[in-house]
Amino acid sequence: MKIKEAEGNAKIKQAYANAVPDICGVILSECEQKEGKVIVMTEEKKRRGYIKYFMAAASLVLVLGAGALLTNVYRLNYAVSSTVSLDVNPSIQITVNEKERVLEVKALNKDGGIVIGDMDFEGSDIDVTMNALIGSMLRKGYLNELANSILISVDNNDPAKGEQLQEKLTEKVNELLESDGFFGAVLGQTIRENGDLQQLAEQYGITQGKAQLIQQILDSTTGHTFEELAPLTINELNLIISTGTSSVEKVSSLGYASDKAYIGEDKAKETAFAHAGVSGQDILFYEMDMDLEKGVMVYEIEFKCGGFEYEYDIDAQTGEIIKNKKEVDDDFQADSQAPSGKTDDPAAGSQSPAPGTKTPDAGSQTPASGTNTPAAGTQSPGGNAATPPSSQQGGKNAGGTSTPSTGGNQAGGSAAGIITLEQAKEIALNHAGQSASAVYFDKLELDHDDGMQKYEIEFVGGYTEYEYEIDAVTGAILKYDWDHDDDRDHEHMPGGSGNSTGGASITLEQAKEIALNHAGQSASAVYFDKLELDYDDGMQIYEIEFVSGNMEYEYDIDAVTGAILKYDWDQD
């Protein structure tokens, strides 16, 4: 059994040897012939190069990712996202990051430093910072019942984010002011970097936000300069905006600016009415604005009464009249009446504030031929009764016959203090020797010229054209012209022939006294710039101008009646 087993193993071994030929020598000889061409080794090196590049790229991605992460962290925490400025009179600038955390709070003027004090806001939330700053302004009296306005300006490169933050802060500050027992006035706006405005802000020591607000006021109104408005507080600027004609559409507003530091509109109005000698119940039109006049806050009051327009500038703090003016109301109609139904005689003579001063009564009855007769008892400034000038009693018509004098025609006053159109027509017709049924009227008009109301009447009778100008207050014929079909032009002026107006009833000295009394001045205290007798639309007028202190006065005095036709006071 063992032999058979041994033989079997030998046969198996021989079969295995025959199945796997011995080719070792062949393989070795092949290797010797192809020495140096080791393809497998080359492939191994290429795999290692790819790994190297992959590792480099991965490292770069990690570096970039870390850089982006660090940049984002810096942007969120340390980069300036918005600049917020607060203006009352203190000016403060706050820079915040993307998360609305405060980076820096900086005072832009001395008052701003007082408000900040030793408070450190770095890293604080913007709401907390605003709360502390507003509280400090209230405690230190920068925001109070006399000056309650604050301006909030936000600068952000993203307009939408800037506007959102501005609205949030405006509402926040408004709530803070209301909770402290009085109502504030909060102005809000967004701003963008502007080289010109930044230069102005640096020049005048203000924020760019305040510079932008001032520029908007200047763009919408006239009469001011940047230099004039820059020193004003935000409350003063807010009063100019809210009561005047300034349009600042890019500025939001909550609440109303306080005027409690001033005399108030009612007192200013009372002062103006008293000086003009009118009653509030007779006023036909009234308007009030607050404005700046040569560095002084003033109430600008305009009103209409009895056929005249009045303008007054009243010092808002002292109540002093800085400037006033009186002119004929161009919109006034002959049939206008004061609301109260009372007659308000706007006769050209102005009411003088000086006690005891008398001026000729412009409402005196006057013959239509041009003879001006002062009312009985009316004294000229010199104390003598005014003497009427000699006058030509009528003219001559085309046929050479004398026209009747209209001395019997009295200029009866209407409810508005002037004669009616029918009365003016009658004066002209009587002077021309015509009747209403025999003429055709081309023009019937109430006009205003150089502070005087007059009727312009034109009509045709036969072969003659007639033109008349009738004083609407006195009924006097200021000028008339007859024009005939043979082109002869026959023009007369009342009180003489040709263009003569006859002699003046009052002297230059009397006219000076009238103006000085009305202004409350004396001759020794003024310097006269102009003293002139002039002719204007057939009327003799003394034009008088003088200076007293820092005030300039201008007067037009009727040389016949002594009435003040126009006056103007202005601060020099």
Image (cartoon, rainbow, N blue to C red):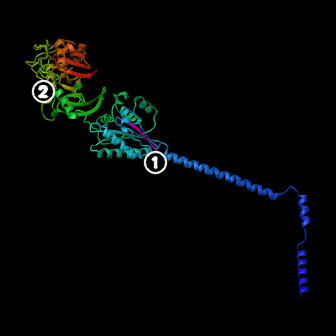
Left or right relative to 448: residue 46? right
- The magenta span reads 90-102
Residue pictured at 26% horizontal, 30% vertical: 298
Q: Give residue 30's quadrant in the image.
A: bottom right
Q: Position of residue 164 (x, y in %)?
A: 41, 46
Q: In 3D space, how far apart are the residues under numbered discs 1 and 2 (Cα atoms)?
A: 77 Å
Q: Earlier in the sequence, mark 1 or mark 2?
A: 1
Residue pictured at 13% horizontal, 35% vertical: 340
Reply yes or no: does residue 95 show up in magenta.
yes
Residue positioned most to the bottom:
1
The answer to whether residue 252 shows anywhere in this view is no
Give the numbered dot on residue 447.
none
Q: Give residue 570's quadrant in the image.
A: top left
Q: SS of the residue at dot 1?
A: loop
Say which residue label 2 marks: 413
Left or right relative to 151: residue 104? right
In the image, residue 83 sits, relative to residue 301, either above or below, namely below
Viewer-proximal residue, 327 or 88?
Answer: 88
Q: Position of residue 407 (x, y in %)?
A: 10, 18
Q: Give residue 475's quadrant in the image.
A: top left
Say which residue label 1 marks: 99
